Image: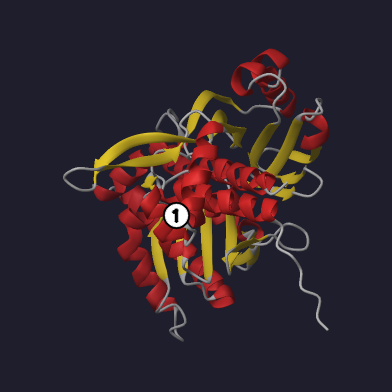
Amino acid sequence: MKTIKKVDPKLMKKMNKQLILRYLIEHGPASRTELVSKTGLASSAVWRMIEELVEEGFVEQKEYFARTNTKKAAVYGIARNFVTSLLVDVQVLQTTVAVGFLDGSCRVLETFPTGSFDDFSKRIKSFLSEKTLNKLFGKGEKIRVIFSLPGIVDTIKGVLLYAPNLKWHDIAFREEFAKKSNVEIIVENDSNLSLLAESFYARDIKNSSNAFFLYLGEGVGGAIFINGRIVIGSSFAAGEVGHTLLQASGVPIEVEELLSISRLVDKFENRKNLEKVGTLRERFVRLQRAWLSSDEVAKELIQEFIKNLAIVIRNVGYTLNPDIIVLGGSVSNLWETFGASIQKEITRLDEYGFLRNTVFRDTLFKETSASLLGCNVLAINKFLEDMMG
């Protein structure tokens, strides 16, 4: 005789609350009637749980909208000021510290030159002082700090294994920064976080079975999304296309040497005797403008860059055969600007037609770093997991 397991009503309630919160986070404010329709929960359960979520400070009433000539329906959304975490987006040249909110938004607190690890550590520890944390999170609250790092990261031990462009190796972030019992330190690779943000906000990624994010900036990285999950790899190096090799004049060379936006811009400025001023994005915009105005040096460098980029995309496409390849990182309009030329080169290289169904596009995130938003998505997912106790 089979044993019938009883449903734990407390667990079921937590799951239903989590379902409502996730819907509101991903889709924005909704009425209780819409939540009943979209979640499949009973009307009475939705009404009761919305009231509890409001009392707990997770949800707030946003507005009313006209439902009939005589009645109005309340619209509920995630509370604007509910803090999930402290976000630290580490890039080679600069670091951004922000506060993440449960509604998916974030507020930048400071941006500073990354510099040496000692200097970086002092700046971060100033944000982790008891006074600052109490002000941001409230006294005695659990505090989660998410680091986005440009290198290979042991997410289990909280260790940055290798970040060649920073010259940081084997740094135990969890040990360095988790000095208080209520502070949890989480570290993750910037490419993985960028793709996590895309998978959270972009319907095409969410609905795909296989996607790839190609991160181009000071260095080159990649992230793989298969069946709803970011692939990490046995040594945390899945997707690290920047460290794969190509042959150049008979000599093996890392892809990062060929596709780094920073190196590309440096070459242009050196050959044109230009002053290296502004952010990497601003400097790249100047290169784009020169290319659009048919500057010979810009045309030559971009043509070489596109050929190398097409080879890397072809290799990724033939290895993973993804539904979607997203281009992002320090710049957010590569495909918009050079897509026709890149597509032409990919088509020339795609002799078997394996990439004919692959969609290429730029990252959704034009102004805010995708990896910074990915930090907050990770924090939100952790928060929802905490709800299950």
In the rendered image, the quadrant that contains the N terminus is: bottom right
Residue 328 seen in the figure: no
The residue depicted at 80 percent of the width and 30 percent of the height is 176
Residue 282 seen in the figure: yes
- Which residue is the site of mark 1? 43
| Image: 229 above or below 139 | below
Q: Nearer the viewer, residue 131 or 255?
A: 131
Q: Residue furthest top?
A: 131
Q: Nearer the viewer, residue 350 or 53?
A: 53
Residue 67 location (% of width, % of height)? 23, 48
Residue 27 location (% of width, % of height)? 41, 50
Side (left or right) of 38 relative to 118: left
| Image: 36 above or below 132 | below
Task: Give SS at disc 1.
Answer: helix
Residue 40 location (% of width, % of height)? 47, 62
- Three-letter code, disc 1: Ser
What scheme was used to colour the molecule?
A: secondary structure
Residue 20 location (% of width, % of height)? 51, 50
